[in-house]
Image (tube, helix red, strand yellow):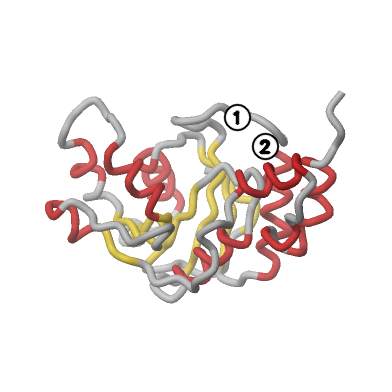
Amino acid sequence: MIFFRRAPGEPAALGVLAGTFNPPTRAHLALARAALGRVEEVLFVLPRRFPHKPYEGPSFEDRVRMLELALQELPRTSLAASEGGLFIEIARECRAAYPPATELFFVCGRDAAERIVHWDYGRPDAIREQLREYQLLVAPRRGVWRPPDELADRIHPLAMEEGYDEVSATEVRERIRSGRPWRHLVPESIAEMVEGLYGRPRP
């Protein structure tokens, strides 16, 4: 794990917000703000490879720069790159970078939590084993999700301010392509960079 920004101190509880950030949105920052009510630091993680989607669009370096700019307005946040893309891989990289006693909480929305829990890891008990190494903080996204009973002690609801259900990186990209308003969906600090990266005319 390589850090581009690191909050001071050693948190007893660390929130981990991993994603493609293509581009970062106001919803990402809202998730982090909500998590900071439960943990002492939120670590934004940009994997160098993803398990469920190809790396397309702006470069890794461009995404790091967008996150650096966006996080300037959010204290107690860090930014790092991971080698692995699965939560268990990121968790083990976090274990090597933070004190052993640090509690790890991956922060995500309902849609991501469902994908993580029901992902085919090759063994039916794999997710239960993984959740011994980290926990989940799950914000509602187009509805509240109830985790399987056997995992409920490691998956916790995360209260989040309303108004972000329709805010997504996909929506930003689609609005830019179709010429609809989009700037209200991204942090103001990165709007110009987003326009330059995603608004270029196609050859």
Callout 2 secondary element: helix
Q: Quadrant of the C terminus?
A: top right
Q: Residue furthest bottom?
A: 37
Decide: is 98 above or below 20.
Answer: below
Counting residues from the start of the chain, the first of labels 1 and 2 encountered is 1
- Residue 169 as seen in the image, left or right of residue 134: right
Q: Quadrant of residue 60?
A: top right
Decide: is 22 above or below 71.
Answer: above
Residue closer to the observer: 180 or 132: 180
Q: Residue 34, percent across and down?
A: 47, 71
How many angstroms separate mark 1 from mark 2 (CA)?
9 Å
Residue for badge 2:
60
The amino acid type of the residue labelled 1 equals Tyr
Callout 1 secondary element: loop
Image point (58%, 63%), residue name? 29
Q: Residue 61, percent across and down?
A: 71, 39
Q: Residue 45, percent across and down?
A: 53, 48
The amino acid type of the residue labelled 2 equals Phe
Nearer the observer: mark 1 or 2; the answer is 1
Q: Residue 24, percent across and down?
A: 64, 52
Residue for badge 1:
55
Image point (31%, 61%), residue name? 101
Asked if the residues shown at circle 1 and circle 2 are in contact, with their CB atoms under 8 angstroms apart, the answer is yes
Residue closer to the observer: 202 or 21: 202
Image point (84%, 44%), residue name? 196
Q: Which residue lies furthest to the left in this view?
A: 150
- Residue 123 as seen in the image, left or right of residue 63: left
Image point (16%, 32%), residue name? 124
